[in-house]
Image (spheres, rainbow, N blue to C red):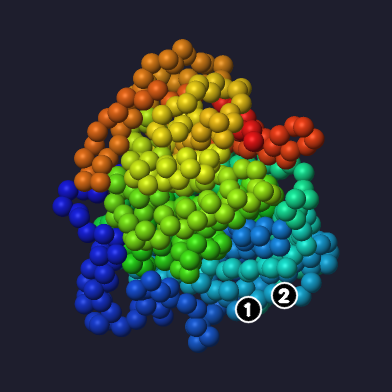
Amino acid sequence: MRNTPGRNLTLAEQHERYTARYTRRALFRAGVVGGAALAVGGALPMASAATERVSGSALRPFGRHLAFGADPSQQVVVSWQAPAAVTGPFIRIGTSPTDLGSPIAAEVRTLTSQLSWQHPVEDEPLVKPKTVVQQYLHARLDRLVPDTTYYYVVGHQGYDPAGRLDGVATFRTAPAAGRGAGFGFTAFGDQGVGYNAIATANLISGLSPAFHLHMGDLSYANTDGDGGTDNKYDARVWDGFFRQNEPAAAQIPWMIAVGNHEMEPWYAADGYGGVRARFTMPDNAWSGSTGIYSWRYQNVGLISLDGNDICYNTPANLDYTKGKQLAWLKSTLAAMRADPTLDFIVVYFHQCVYSTCQDNGAELGAQQKWGPLFDQYTVDLVLNGHNHIYERTDPIRAGKATRKLPSGDTVTPAKDGTTYVVAGGGGGGIYSFPGTDTYMGHETSNDGTQPMKVSDEGGHDKTVKVTWSRVRYTGYCLVAVDVAPAKGTTPARMTVRSLTEDGTAVDQFTVQR
């Protein structure tokens, strides 16, 4: 989604201009509203010991969601919300649902949003506060036992579910590196809130993967998604997002990348103050990185990138890392490819490196800046969202297909190149292709060219004819990956499937090392 004509300010500049205007009009005139000031300069308004709290006996936690740390065999983060400020939020955890141990204090991150710059999606009462205050709780768990199922409950003063089996959830840590058997994971982007989003989340629960990757554009609380302070936004849509996904996300870690709709300029200069309040990802690229991190699960190295940093199509945060992300990506890929215990490298981020869907097009910035590194270090699989369809390329090197890869076939990245998948059918409204669909059971000859639309750095669109678009499906779906380590003379493999909401496969291929 391109900036409208005349909007040439970066997201940081828009944030600075907005907060200056807000300060003049509101803070100096009325003082702090609702007990907390608007976050400025990248800082989030945090809970204070002096904040008045209501009785917790009638309040119930909601929206539980898990994430792994960089070492998923030992590190898990449990996050949730409270409907109001509560005293002493905690988690209890144990290896039995009837023996959950002592409370472990949770970190409170309070996010305050002014109603004056929101567009509520539901009717508002005549008498209402001037702010929306959301309480996000996070408990970092470390030194866990690998390959172990844990049970947990969350609570606060006045509400302790331990001993009642009330709201008990589970998660399982990863096996120690090199000691596990095969595993599976799922992925999609562009989910939103609604019945199609519920269907894809339910499919995750049914598949019971080790983890789920979300390639950005999570809730669409920010409807416009171009990083402008005039975007239509309703902070409470996030409440629905977390509650909708809780049945899956409370049991299965969700590892997120940021999309353009996560650029919320009201909270911080980089637009990610809201993300930092709601989620706890490893974010180990450098101190202060958000949505940029690496981790591993068994024999797979995984890298999350921020596509907004290289996005010519929606340039509000273009080059905001000043080259740090590119340098970190190069060093991280080099280290992963040099590690003999890693068979596969999977990179995931929001914007599409390659796609023939023209609603958001393909991202020339990713092709120019990251594509050569993916080639150099033979990245096995790149997963994107952004376009609300499913599309899979033939293996690509230097921007060109090296061979055809029909459904059911096997690709060897060291010889053939990288396969790119767009899985943006997580629940948001579906887009369309200029060409015909072609997928398992509905294949076409597909030997001609397809148009790829890209925007250059100056914001000018152009269309290029390409031959690598092998599978195209217009509909909601997710990607399910089954990983098998090497055994005897059988090489390590990843079987990649695309499944519709009811579990029907529309694509399948195997990546082999």
Q: Amino acid at mark 2?
A: Pro
Query: Neighbour class for label 2 at 10 Å: few (<14), some, many (≥20)?
Result: some
Which numbered disc, 1 or 2, marks the residue that appears first in the sequence? 1
Label 2 sits on residue: 103
Q: How many marks?
A: 2
Q: Is residue 409 above or below residue 423?
A: above
In the image, taking residue 395 as reference, residue 117 lies left or right, namely left
Quadrant where the C terminus sits is: top right
Query: Neighbour class for label 1 at 10 Å: few (<14), some, many (≥20)?
Result: some
Q: Position of residue 70 (x, y in %)?
A: 61, 60
* Residue 195 seen: no
Q: Quadrant of residue 168?
A: bottom right
Q: Which of the pair 439/201 is nearer the observer? A: 439
At a point 40% along the width and 74% down the height, the residue shown is 43
Q: Position of residue 77 (x, y in %)?
A: 63, 63
Q: Position of residue 497 (x, y in %)?
A: 60, 31
Q: Quadrant of residue 58?
A: bottom right
Label 1 sits on residue: 88
- Do the numbered discs 1 and 2 sit on residues whose CB atoms are within 8 Å? yes
Which residue in the rendered view is the most extreme toward the bottom? 50
Q: Amino acid at mark 1?
A: Gly
Q: Position of residue 182 (x, y in %)?
A: 74, 41
Q: Secondary structure at mark 1?
A: loop
Which residue in the rendered view is the most extreme toward the left? 6
